[in-house]
């Protein structure tokens, strides 16, 4: 609310939203539930569950890591939105979107989750707008995709919960699996349900694109893991894992080919996000706790890479204060911003020595023996990296002046450094993801086939 | 079911799909909103006739609120279905493919004998709901413009509700779905209005 009231002050609003998201993440991760504790001298007691309209929102050891993850990865684009000159409403609406996504992870039974994810996507329509604020194609496509996806998952949920679907009831199980697969495919932005993403790359601010894509894809990943954890018949059904593998390969193949055909930076990154999530799906399709940990770690690396690209890309052009010279083919750019945009995009591509590489490397190790999957992962890295480098070569010459404000320089240098540090020392991120997965008895399928 | 209930039920079965079809055909702003309210009213009549008066009233009220919210946005933006339909650009191939897949899967799911046998829905109600839903999807296929998409999406949601309320009569889910409908109408109304405080930046395409 403070972020919305102060939206006229872009820096304040974005920091309030970012810090608010971090605090909510810290509360989800660290708060003691059911026992009183002191905050600034005041006694506070948080119950692990709240009842809303007869349904429970539960914060339990099984889901608190995933909720904390959603808030903390969401905080990165919200806090960075000021440095990227993002729409002022992104801070306040973005925080609301994160709260809805957290509610989607907390609600019991989890079949209600898609309604919260759809509500988050509906709010997201307010940020994927054109620079003049009018809705283009991204907002209606996003609206349609997620509401129809919600209907598919609700129908599947009914078949499962009420229809009594089990592995023995073959036909309803297949119907439920297909509907659930369709809904999850929409939520994780599998082609051909990715059209809102590319429309958003054309029309909306890079930070809005990055925030919504990473937040909704993470929500889709958790919904997928929840489904696998909740239904033993799904874990026992080889078709489910074949479907995930197929969806992952499709995302990598199409995303890679589209990337090669694309020259515009935001669209290359949009396709890079498809390829990146495709690799995550291959990791999940391995049906091992290690694979789930890799997918979770990749979601964190993806958020870092995308946000650094967003800040860098938004600060590329040098504001001259006058009309650009038509005789000048390419406008000068800020070198620091270009370095950040390049590092972020190459991290999404999964190039060695960037944050995104470790996930690809570990996925390659996980899918050992699956030659098609291995080749697809390598093709994805090469295709996206080549497209990014080709785009960077088309940028204008570096400008001497005017330079960027100090705060932005710090963010750009810090972001670029974090990508390299995570690329050189990825262990702690993935160790955290693996330990988180190991502790998530409710999310990780106990007996993968 | 009494005779009056049967008449109310039958009226709803006809009203919802007819108004949903009218929504696709109309070129007038207020007629479109009237048709949308007609879809909600038809679904509410079906629920009333089948002995769910509270859910029926809630659905009718949700429809009225959605139409009021949309009316404000339409009036301020001077939106009209005619403007966009005559000058509309057909959707991209990817989008149309997605729509075809969704419609195909929905039709398949409904017509699968096993699914139909397990959900025990009266055939007339299933048909009415499927037509309202399909008309909503058709509206979505005809335009990518925000106002027209919202009208189609709400019609599709009502068609879905006509069926889903029989499968899962939980009040909590009704409330959440009503919030989804109101949220859709509200966001559309905001987006259609003249922008006020959207941030800077016209640096995207590079």
Image (tube, rainbow, N blue to C red):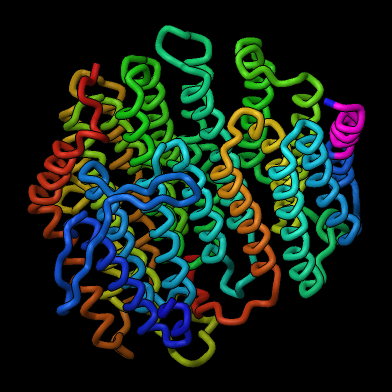
Q: Residue at x 16, y 32 (%)?
A: A290
Name the image quarter holding residue A310. bottom left
Nearer to us in this view, A295 or A249: A295
Could you say where residue A262 lies in the image, as x and y percent from the top left?
Answer: 47, 50
Name the image quarter holding residue A421. bottom left
Q: Is residue B4 magenta?
A: yes
Q: Residue at x 54, y 34 (%)?
A: A154
Q: Residue at x 25, y 20 (%)?
A: A370
Q: Is residue A258 magenta?
A: no
Could you say where residue B82 lies in the image, as x and y percent from the top left?
Answer: 88, 58
Nearer to us in this view, A241 or A312: A241
Residue B182 visible here: yes
Q: Is residue A73 above or below residue A271?
A: below
Residue A305 visible here: no
Q: Residue at x 25, y 27 (%)?
A: A445
Could you say where residue B115 lies in the image, as x and y percent from the top left?
Answer: 61, 16
Q: Which residues are magenta?
A: B2-15
Split into 4 quadrants, where in the image is the N terminus of chain A? bottom left
Magenta region, mostly helix, strand or loop? helix
Q: Is residue B145 above or below residue B8?
A: below
């Amino acid at each position: 609310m403070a972020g919305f009231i102060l939206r006229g002050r872009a820096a304040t609003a974005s920091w309030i939203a970012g810090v608010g998201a971090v605090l909510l993440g810290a509360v989800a991760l660290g708060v003691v539930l059911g026992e009183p504790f002191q905050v600034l001298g005041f006694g506070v007691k948080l119950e692990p569950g709240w009842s809303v309209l007869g349904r429970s929102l539960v914060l339990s050891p099984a889901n608190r890591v995933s909720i904390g993850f959603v808030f903390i990865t969401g905080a990165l684009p919200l806090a960075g939105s000021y440095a990227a000159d993002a729409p002022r409403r992104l801070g306040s609406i973005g925080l609301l979107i994160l709260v809805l996504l957290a509610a989607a992870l907390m609600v019991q039974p989890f079949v209600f989750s898609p309604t919260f994810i759809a509500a988050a996507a509906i709010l997201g329509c307010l940020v994927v707008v054109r620079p003049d604020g009018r809705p283009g194609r991204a907002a209606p496509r996003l609206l349609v995709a997620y509401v129809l996806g919600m209907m598919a998952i609700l129908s599947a949920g009914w078949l499962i919960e009420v229809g009594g679907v089990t592995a023995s009831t073959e036909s309803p199980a297949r119907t439920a699996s297909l509907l659930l697969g369709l809904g999850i495919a929409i939520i994780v932005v599998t082609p051909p349900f990715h059209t809102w993403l590319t429309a958003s790359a054309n029309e909306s601010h890079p930070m809005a694109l990055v925030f919504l894509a990473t937040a909704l894809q993470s929500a889709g990943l958790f919904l997928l893991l929840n489904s696998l954890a909740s239904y033993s018949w799904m874990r026992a059904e080889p078709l489910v894992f074949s479907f995930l593998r197929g969806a992952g390969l499709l995302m990598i193949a199409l995303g890679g080919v589209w990337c090669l055909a694309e020259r515009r930076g935001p669209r290359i990154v949009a396709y890079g996000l498809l390829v990146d999530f495709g690799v995550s799906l291959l990791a999940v399709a391995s049906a091992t706790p290690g694979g789930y940990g890799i997918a979770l770690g990749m979601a964190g690396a993806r958020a870092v890479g995308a946000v650094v690209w967003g800040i860098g890309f938004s600060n590329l052009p040098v504001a001259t204060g006058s009309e650009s010279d038509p005789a000048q083919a390419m406008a000068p750019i800020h070198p620091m911003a270009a370095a950040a945009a390049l590092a972020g995009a190459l991290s999404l591509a999964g190039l060695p020595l960037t944050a995104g590489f470790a996930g690809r490397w570990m996925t390659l190790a996980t899918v050992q023996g699956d030659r098609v999957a291995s080749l697809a992962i390598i093709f994805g890295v090469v295709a996206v990296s080549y497209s990014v480098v080709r785009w960077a070569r088309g940028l204008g010459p570096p400008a001497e002046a005017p330079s960027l404000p100090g705060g932005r320089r710090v963010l750009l240098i810090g972001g670029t450094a974090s990508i390299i540090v995570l690329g050189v020392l990825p262990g702690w991120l993935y160790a955290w993801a693996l330990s988180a997965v190991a502790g998530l008895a409710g999310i990780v399928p106990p007996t993968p086939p | 079911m009494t005779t009056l209930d049967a008449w109310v039920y039958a009226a709803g079965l006809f009203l919802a799909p007819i108004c949903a079809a009218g929504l696709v055909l109309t070129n007038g702003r207020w007629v479109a909103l009237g048709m949308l309210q007609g879809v909600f009213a038809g679904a509410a009549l079906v629920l009333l006739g089948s002995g769910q008066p509270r859910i029926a009233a809630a659905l009718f009220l949700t429809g009225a609120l959605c139409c009021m919210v949309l009316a404000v946005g339409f009036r301020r933006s001077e939106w009209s279905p005619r403007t966009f339909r005559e000058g509309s650009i057909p959707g991209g191939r990817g989008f149309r493919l997605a729509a075809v897949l969704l419609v195909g899967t929905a039709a398949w799911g409904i017509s699968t004998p096993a699914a139909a046998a397990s959900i025990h829905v009266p055939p007339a109600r299933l048909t009415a709901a499927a037509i309202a839903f399909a008309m909503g999807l058709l509206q979505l296929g005809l335009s990518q413009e925000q106002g027209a998409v919202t009208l189609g999406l709400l019609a599709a949601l009502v068609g879905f509700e006509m069926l889903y309320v029989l499968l899962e009569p939980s009040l909590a889910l009704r409330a959440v779905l009503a919030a989804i409908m109101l949220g859709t109408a509200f966001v559309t109304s905001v987006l259609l209005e003249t922008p006020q405080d959207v941030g800077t930046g016209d640096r995207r395409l590079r």
